[in-house]
Amino acid sequence: MDEPTKVNFPRRAAAKARTRQRIEEAARRLFVTLGYADATMAAIAEAADIHITTLFTHFASKRDLAAAIAVTAGTRFEAVVATHRAQGVPVLTFWRNQVVRLAHAYERDGDGQINLGRALAGEPELLPVWYGHQRLQIDLMTDYIADELGIDPTVDRRAQMVAAMLVAGGRMAFDAWIESGRAGDLVAENERLLDAAEAVLARGLPLSRRDGI
């Protein structure tokens, strides 16, 4: 007897993907405006204009939804990196623009944006996803740096060390700003840290291709 033929429903799958995207976007808006703790699943369903039962068919919990948002952010960052690499944008120029853009977002969106980042980082069940996102950033930046230098990152670990320094630097500036009671200028703090990182790299690992490196 012949095996039953598996039927694909591309329109149904596309509709499901659109609904999932709408849910994630609504959740992220509420996480920013209300904070992670105060954004209920009922409020998210209402913001996404769906029944709460539909919401739970896509995400079993708010933690699952927050994790999906982090994964989506990583996918988008990967696409941004690929585009800038293809355009030949120098790696430090790219990273500076990304960090400063994020600093402006934190300053502009106020408590909501800050609470979102801190809540996601502080959720024990989300720690693997959070660290995975940071790991992805480091890996992508490692490849970006290695390509610009013309080195093999699996043999020469300097590119990975620089990538880790850049990713950690953004976090350092944010933490210093929070500890100061947000009294300072987060954008300027990031600029100062990036200037310092570039000075260190210029002495220890110039980010320019050299013959025989």
Image: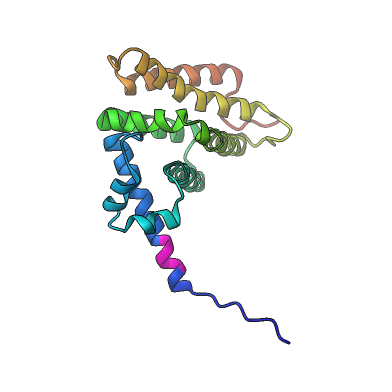
| Residue 146 occupies quadrant | top right
Q: Nearer the viewer, residue 14 or 151?
A: 14
Q: Is residue 81 magenta?
A: no
Tell how many labels. Answer: 0
Looking at the picture, how far across and down is residue 122, in whole percent? Answer: 46, 28
Residue at the image position 68 percent from the left and 28 percent from the top: 157
Quadrant placement of the N terminus? bottom right
Horizontal side, residue 23 vs residue 127: left or right: left
Quadrant placement of the C terminus? top right
Task: Work out whether 180 lies above or below 166.
Answer: above
Residue at the image position 44 percent from the left and 57 percent from the top: 57
Looking at the picture, how far across and down is residue 199, in whole percent? Answer: 50, 17
Q: How is the image coloured?
A: rainbow
Dominant secondary structure of the residues highlighted in magenta in the image: helix
Horizontal side, residue 197 vs residue 21: left or right: right
Horizontal side, residue 205 vs residue 93: left or right: right
| Residue 29 occupies quadrant | top left
Pick out the residue farthest to the front.
53
Query: What range of the chain is rendered magenta?
Result: 13-17
| Residue 34 occupies quadrant | top left
Horizontal side, residue 144 vs residue 178: left or right: right
Q: Nearer the viewer, residue 43 or 160?
A: 43
Q: Nearer the viewer, residue 2 or 164?
A: 2
Residue at the image position 41 percent from the left and 43 percent from the top: 62
Pick out the residue farthest to the bottom.
1
Q: Nearer the viewer, residue 115 or 74?
A: 115
Looking at the picture, how far across and down is residue 130, in whole percent? Answer: 51, 34
Task: Work out whether 115 lies above or below 198.
Answer: below
Looking at the picture, how far across and down is residue 161, in whole percent? Answer: 61, 25
